[in-house]
Image (spheres, rainbow, N blue to C red):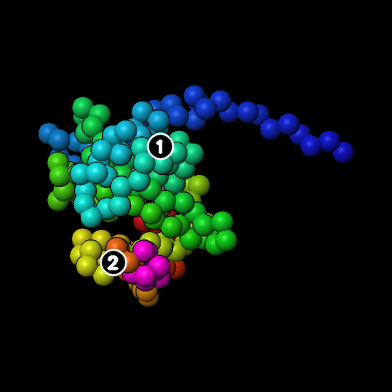
């Protein structure tokens, strides 16, 4: 018995820009939410740098997220194409009903619009994530903005939120606050 040959998708086709999944914001300043592509990589990197206390990774890492993990990431741009929001994450291999959100960033120009929540919900409502019923992330104890976002998501999704220490300061080299593992769920993606 022979294994059927799977069609090869060239990298150029994987990174083609797509139409926005959602348009949010005000009519005079719309924001476009969509899957990222390679052209967004540098903009994502610059956005993360402008959003302390987020840990900044290499531009290469953001290019990988924008291409290899694009189905589980979202980017928001303004009319000029500037990246003003980004969420990265992945579905866990060992728990395919769980999405792990790695970073969420909203730039100064888009703050106060509910963009962080809209980015997360844009990802969670994608058909390829229909089997996901839990969201996990890590948050430092003093990151009030992130705690607020995840509490609002849990309330909107009518799902429990639990947390516990996940990485200690010592595990993080002594120069980083501890990270708490935060878990929302179970929830139904068709209600998001």
Around disc 2, counting alpha carbons within 10 Å, would you say few (fewer than 14), some (14 to 19), or many (20 or more)? Answer: some
Which of the 4 image quarters holds residue 174? bottom left
Q: Is residue 133 left or right of residue 45?
A: right
Task: Check residue 181 in the rendering and tell me which mark sits there, or answer none.
Answer: none
In-image side of 123 versus 47 (left or right): right
Would you place residue 89 above or below residue 64 in this image? Answer: below
Quarter of the image for residue 170 reads: bottom left
Relative height, residue 1 to residue 147 (above, below): above
Q: Which residue is mark 2?
A: 177
User: What residue is at 41 percent from the left and 61 percent from the top?
Assistant: 135
Q: Residue at x 36, y 41 (%)?
A: 58
Pointer 2 with pointer 1, Cβ within 8 A = no
Residue, far left: 28
**Residue beneath the point at 27% across and 53% down:** 54
Whole-Å distance between the Cαs marked 2 and 1? 25 Å
Label 1: state its secondary structure. helix
- Please state the horizontal and vertical placement of residue 171, each as a whole percent of the image: 40, 67
Circle 1: is it few (<14), some (14-19), or many (20+) Cα within 10 Å? Answer: few
Q: Which residue is mark 1?
A: 60
Which segment did they paint magenta? 166-173
Of the two numbered discs 2 and 1 on the same chain, state the one appearing first in sequence. Answer: 1
């Amino acid at each position: 018995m022979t294994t059927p040959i799977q069609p090869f998708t060239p990298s150029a086709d994987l990174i083609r820009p797509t139409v926005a999944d959602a348009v949010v914001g005000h009519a005079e300043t719309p924001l476009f939410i969509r899957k990222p592509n390679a052209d967004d990589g540098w903009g994502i990197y610059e956005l993360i740098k402008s959003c302390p206390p987020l840990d900044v990774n290499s531009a290469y890492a953001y290019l990988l997220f924008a291409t290899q993990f694009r189905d589980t990431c979202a980017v928001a741009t303004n009319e000029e194409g500037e990246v003003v929001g980004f969420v990265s994450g992945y579905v866990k291999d060992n728990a395919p009903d769980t999405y792990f959100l790695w970073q969420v960033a909203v730039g100064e120009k888009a703050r106060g619009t509910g963009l962080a929540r809209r980015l997360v919900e844009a990802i969670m409502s994608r058909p390829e994530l229909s089997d996901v019923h839990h969201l996990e992330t890590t948050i430092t104890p003093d990151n009030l903005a992130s705690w607020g976002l995840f509490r609002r998501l849990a309330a909107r999704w009518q799902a429990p939120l639990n947390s516990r220490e996940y990485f200690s300061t010592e595990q993080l080299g002594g120069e980083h606050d501890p990270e708490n593992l935060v878990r929302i769920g179970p929830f139904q993606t068709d209600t998001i």
